[in-house]
Image: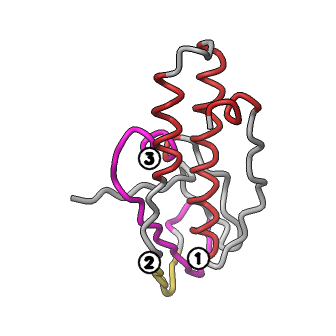
């Protein structure tokens, strides 16, 4: 079975730049054991307010499956940790979700030929303690 998710969270009318990815894709990745297969869509369109856009040609590029084994293992350790406070656990899990989201969005940018202008997230000190 497969499910298609657009991690930008909404339609993107910009054919050159991706919107910031939503953390939900990172959450779903950590909570499941499935591989993520990035699919980049590249197209040109003519946007008309009040009308449906005209899409000329769509180029679909399928990337290699992404496993995120290390991130899932680290999330498991964080959840089971007795040395971390609830706030530290939440912070560490948010970091992992953002890291996964960034990795997926970066792959989508490579496949689609669009820019992803957002920076990778900074690892909080609590994650270093768990590793």
In 3D space, how far apart are the residues under numbered discs 2 and 3 (Cα atoms)? 18 Å
Residue 89 pos. (x, y %): 59, 22
Residue positioned 50% across, 35% down in the render: 75
Q: Quadrant of the N terminus?
A: bottom left
Q: Neighbour class for label 1 at 10 Å: few (<14), some, many (≥20)? A: many
Residue 120 pos. (x, y %): 74, 52
Residue bearing the label numbered 1: 112
Q: Earlier in the sequence, mark 2 or mark 3?
A: 3
Comparing labels 2 and 3, the label whose residue is closer to the camera: 3
Q: Nearer the viewer, residue 3 or 76?
A: 76
The boundaries of the magenta stretch are 26-52
- Residue 127 covered by magenta stretch: no
Q: Neighbour class for label 3 at 10 Å: few (<14), some, many (≥20)? A: many
Residue positioned 77% across, 43% down in the render: 122
In 3D space, how far apart are the residues under numbered discs 2 and 1 (Cα atoms)? 10 Å
Left or right, 120 with reference to 77: right
Q: Secondary structure at mark 1?
A: helix
Q: Quadrant of the C terminus?
A: top right
Q: Earlier in the sequence, mark 1 or mark 3?
A: 3
Residue bearing the label numbered 2: 62
Residue 35 pos. (x, y %): 38, 59
Q: Earlier in the sequence, mark 2 or mark 1?
A: 2
Residue 99 pos. (x, y %): 63, 48
Eyeballing the image, is 90 above or below 63?
above
Comparing labels 1 and 3, the label whose residue is closer to the camera: 3
Quadrant in which residue 108 is drawn: bottom right
CB of mark 2 within 8 Å of CB of mark 1? no
Comparing labels 2 and 1, the label whose residue is closer to the camera: 2
Quadrant in which residue 116 is drawn: bottom right
Determine which of the numbered discs, if any, sits on residue 66 in the image.
none
Residue bearing the label numbered 3: 29
């Amino acid at each position: 079975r497969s499910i298609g998710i657009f991690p930008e969270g909404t339609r993107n009318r910009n054919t050159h730049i991706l919107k910031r990815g939503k953390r939900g894709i990172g959450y779903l990745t950590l909570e499941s054991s499935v591989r993520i297969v990035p699919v980049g869509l590249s197209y040109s369109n003519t946007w008309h307010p009040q009308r449906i856009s005209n899409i000329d040609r769509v180029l679909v590029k399928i990337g290699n499956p992404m496993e995120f084994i290390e991130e899932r293992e680290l999330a498991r350790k964080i959840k089971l940790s007795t040395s971390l406070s609830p706030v530290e656990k939440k912070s560490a899990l948010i970091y992992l979700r953002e890291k996964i989201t960034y990795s997926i969005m970066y792959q989508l940018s490579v496949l689609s030929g669009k820019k992803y202008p957002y920076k990778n997230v900074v690892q909080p000190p609590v994650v270093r303690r768990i590793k």
